[in-house]
Amino acid sequence: MGKSTAAAMLRGLGVPVFDADLVVHRLLAPKGAAVSLVSAMFSGVGADGGGIDRARLGQRVFADPMALRRLEGILHPMVVAEEKQFLARSRTRRERLVVLDIPLLFETGAERRCDYVVVVSASSLVQRQRVLRRPGMTEIRLRAVLQKQISDCEKRRRADFVVPTGAGRHLTLRRLKSIINVLRERSDDNFSKMRSPPRQPASIRAKAIASSRSLA
């Protein structure tokens, strides 16, 4: 859907972004905190030089809901712990606005941890073209991924803001700038009304289609 591009734009606009996918990469990299637990639960997924072979792990859990839940039981608490550390650092720096970039936001109920939700959306044609360019992605795998998610229409209905990404980067950037201005104004209004130190940063999230990256 353009989630990574939108997240990079938000960083460029000075908004701190918590990238859950990047955290998972670190957890499964050599010397990562999750390597020993994942290796013990899923034999044969170790990578040369240490760490976890994410492609091999994805093949093990993609079509096995129980295996996926076991993996999530290892990774999710670790990711949430790092998210809390990110928010604590943001409060210390007195940030008024931060972004939580989390795969499968609505599907996992993680939107309850956010003040606002931003859905990044593109047409089904653009979505399909982008996803099929990824290594290892096929039509069958794409259909299976989509079946695990709520529809784009439902995501947009639940969102506070929708950002189009299929009509050029300039339009996407302009929309993101507009959203940031609105949320910063709301934060300023709340600050004035409360007459106290800034509240916890508003957390927004640019949502996109899950990929094999989201599963492992």
Image (cartoon, helix red, strand yellow):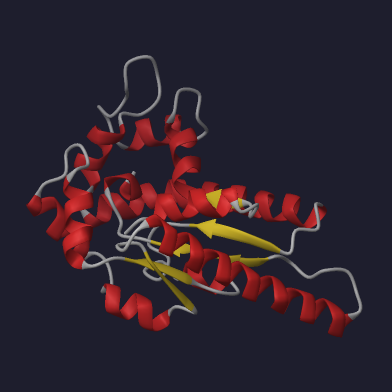
Q: Estimate the x, y position of residue 99 in percent, counting from the top left.
A: 58, 59
- Farthest residue to the left: give it: 140
- Farthest residue to the right: give it: 195
Q: Is residue 94 left or right of residue 1?
A: right
Q: Estimate the x, y position of residue 122 in percent, counting from the top left.
A: 29, 65
User: Is 190 in front, or is 33?
Assistant: 190
User: Is 156 in front, or is 210?
Assistant: 156
Q: Residue at x 71, y 76 (%)?
A: 185
The reply to whether residue 17 is in sight is yes
Figure check: 184 above or below 48: below
Q: Estimate the x, y position of residue 206 in percent, counting from the top left.
A: 46, 62
The reply to whether residue 63 is in sight is no
Q: Residue at x 63, y 52 (%)?
A: 16
User: Is 193 in front, or is 168?
Assistant: 168
Q: Estimate the x, y position of residue 190 in percent, counting from the top left.
A: 78, 80
Q: For residue 106, which quarter of the picture? A: bottom left
Number of callouts: 0
Q: Residue at x 26, y 55 (%)?
A: 66
Q: Is residue 152 left or right of residue 32?
A: left
Which quadrant, please, contains the C terminus?
top left
Which quadrant, please, contains the N terminus?
bottom left
Figure check: 189 above or below 86: below
Q: Is residue 203 left or right of residue 157?
A: right
Figure check: 121 above or below 139: below
User: Is 165 in front, or is 206?
Assistant: 165
